[in-house]
Amino acid sequence: MAKLLVQNSGPLKGEVTISGAKNSVLPLMAACILGEETVTIKDVPELRDVKILTDVLTSIGAKVDKTEANTLEITTEEITSTEPDYDLFNKMRASILIMGPLLSRAGRAKLPMPGGCAIGARPIDLHLKGFKQMGAEITVTDTFIDAVAPEGGLHGARVYLDFPSVGATENIILAAVLANGTTYIENAAKEPEIIDLANLLNKMGARIKGAGTDSVKIEGVEKLHGTFHRVIPDRIELGTFMLAAAITRGEILIKNIVTDHVKPVIAKLEECGVEIELTDEGMVVNAVGKELTATDIKTLPYPGFPTDIQSPFMAFLSTVDGESTVQETVFENRFMHVAELNRMGANIKTQDRTAIIPGNKKLEGAQVIATDLRAGAAMVLAGLVADGTTEVSEIYHIDRGYEHFEEKFRKLGATIIRIED
Ligand code: UD1
């Protein structure tokens, strides 16, 4: 299994350009199978998750062509199977996003129980609740879910989400665009990736209003057509590079960004004493020579502090002056990186869903594991300021969600080597 060897690299300096958002491109690709015509998606990041979803879509009849770097053309003249390949599907939790489109276009979706990052139980009850309310018959066993639409197709419904789940909001929107009648989603997730999905679907001929608010209205239409779409920039990658500047006490110009998407990360870094300046070119994050201090963080659904930035931020907080706390409210088991940071001397304690970070630590290089995608980034950030070498294993998690990860870091002056064994 491949590993990354990370050395103490001093302050990172230079500029980096953010790629298209992983969490947008996956639902966008799932949306493409709703119509027969070709949809062209630009700024598609080259990621393992994109490759997996490409294979999943191909296994049900889509033609996915990479026409140039970062461009996909997806055409689904016909759905040839309502049962995607089991092994492929299980490689990635977000594969569940093809359930809504399959059900609505082909009338059935028989899927294995989804896999993915090991961060808590991650049930899909809210997705299924929505489909049931739209008329689907659902059979769930230990290994698969079989959903069948009623004769004549899914119908509109009023769906209230007990929690504003990103995936459930997306999947129900995807199921509703071709349903008979109007669907309302209440307590919907408000993440920018949901707006991106609605924008693509509306360009394909859907009628969606309210995406990005907690109340989304989808009027069903008969048919969708082809279009062209550019993926929004990845706000989590942006947050990761903001923290790379902060933890190494460096200065990085970050380009291709939407500042509004990272307001809580800006606010919290500024509270710690990091200087953030917005220019015509992008965002300059400057921590050179700064005395940085502690803060408290609570993860929340958007527009609150993103759970995906929690672990990189925790690595940073280990190095500032004073005690910080991080409270995780979105996922029930997202502190697996704490044990890894502690191997490097961070001395973090957890109590239920709160982590207490004593701060003021000079981290030590160690052998650590990327326990999930964002935890992998956190380990690399810690390695950049630790004494000696940090060996990060299970980096397939990092490859799932960061495009040209080491290359981007190396350009900023980081010493990172990938070893394959
Ligand atoms: C998406 C993101 C992920 C991010 C997360 C929260 C993608 C591909 N992934 O994941 O990077 O960390 O949003 O911002 O976009 N839940 C239920 N029942 C359900 C669905 C979810 O109880 O049917 C719970 C989950 O267990 C979790 C919480 O809701 O505790 C949030 O999950 P959700 O918003 O659905 O996250 P994902 O869409 O899986």
Image (tube, grey):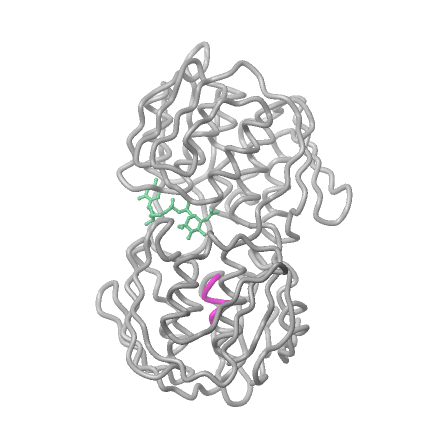
Type of secondary structure dominating the magenta stretch: helix
- Total count of labels: 0
Q: Position of residue 63 (x, y in %)?
A: 70, 32
Q: Residue furthest front?
A: 280
- In this orientation, does residue 129 appear? yes
Foreground residue among 413 and 95 = 413
- In this orientation, does residue 421 appear? no
Which quadrant holds the N terminus? bottom right
Whether residue 137 is situated above or below residue 251 in the rendered picture? above
What residue is at 50 percent from the left and 19 percent from the top? Answer: 178
What residue is at 37 percent from the left and 41 percent from the top? Answer: 189
What residue is at 57 percent from the left and 44 percent from the top? Answer: 25
Q: Residue furthest left?
A: 351
Inspect the magenta stretch and tell me whether residue 410 lies in it.
no
Displayed quadrant of residue 228: top right
What residue is at 54 percent from the left and 33 percent from the top? Answer: 199
Whether residue 261 is situated above or below residue 291 in the rendered picture? above
Q: Position of residue 258 (x, y in %)?
A: 53, 52
Foreground residue among 156 and 332 = 156
Task: Read off the magenta span.
Answer: 374-378
Foreground residue among 293 and 315 = 293
Q: Position of residue 57 (x, y in %)?
A: 61, 36
Inspect the magenta stretch and tell me whether residue 376 lies in it.
yes
Whether residue 18 is situated above or below residue 379 in the rendered picture? above
Whether residue 266 is situated above or below residue 83 in the rendered picture? below
Displayed quadrant of residue 362: bottom left
Which quadrant holds the C terminus? bottom right
Q: Residue furthest top?
A: 152
Foreground residue among 309 and 366 = 309
Q: Position of residue 213 (x, y in %)?
A: 37, 37
